[in-house]
Amino acid sequence: MKNYSANPNHVESVSVDPAEMAHFEKMAEDWWDPTGKFKPLHIMNGCRTRFIKEDICAHFSRDPDALEPLKGLRILDIGCGGGLLCEPMARLGATVTGIDALEKNVKTAKTHAEQSGLEIDYRYGSIEKMTKTEAQAFDVVLNMEVIEHVNDPAGFMKTCAQMVRPGGLLFCSTINRTAKAFTLAIFGAEYVMRWLPKGTHQYAKFLKPAELVRMLKDAGLEPETPQGMVLNPLTSVWKISDDTGVNYVVKAAKAP
């Protein structure tokens, strides 16, 4: 899920958190198990994929009902993990690049894409290195459930924004820093339901929507109003909502 290497020789940013990297490395082989440690992302994936597709189509004047509505668009998924979001984007016709700093994640993603007959450009490394050769190369940059795991979110967001071409989009989703989020995302998900291993999230790293909006603006982007993502615990179905009390997503554009 993360974007920076735990290898001391690979560190390029103060956002690097070796403890976070080590935590997720232990789960790397479980990405495609819908009942495993990434079950919450599997459940969330349909909701966030629809949201991203519809907003991309609206922005680039595409038909969301077309067979491949994202055909011809270059999408970068930063902190791609095992490829849970890369694969549906590829099926929608986009040319997809996924980058992650955990080599195990990238190997898992590559293997699953090959088994699924999908061509996805997966890379092991840091986003900092990509900015040196491919800055402003992507129509859409995805930064989903990642920023709450880095040490310097503002600096990290500026780096991610460098990858967006003029007129392009960046999507960022994360968890709000509220008592409700602590109760549901940490105590509930990690200790009661045991959907996630204990220690997956740290409350102090959660960002309030206003804080993330400010970071996006400081990164040279034009963010829209944050939208909440809410889970119905009875049906295990996520939906987009005005309630940003726990999970939320922000779309931001770069001026042409």
Image (cartoon, helix red, strand yellow):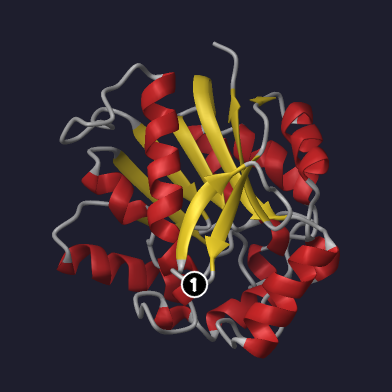
Taking the spot 51% from the left edge, 59% from the top edge, the residue there is: 125
Residue 121 in sight from this viewpoint: no
| Direction from residue 26 to residue 226 in the image, left or right | right
Task: Tally the marks.
Answer: 1
Q: Which residue is mark 1?
A: 234
Position of 52 relative to 202 (above/below): above
Q: Is residue 103 above or below residue 231?
A: below
Nearer the observer, 99 or 253? 253
The percent coordinates of residue 184 (x first, y second) are 70, 72
Quarter occupied by residue 235: bottom left
Amino acid type indicated by mark 1: Leu
**Residue 10, position as x, y percentages in the image:** 63, 64
Residue 170, position in %: x, y? 55, 34
Furthest residue toward top: 256
At 52% from the left edge and 70% from the top edge, which residue is drawn?
A: 102
Question: Which residue is at 76% across, 43% downward?
Answer: 209
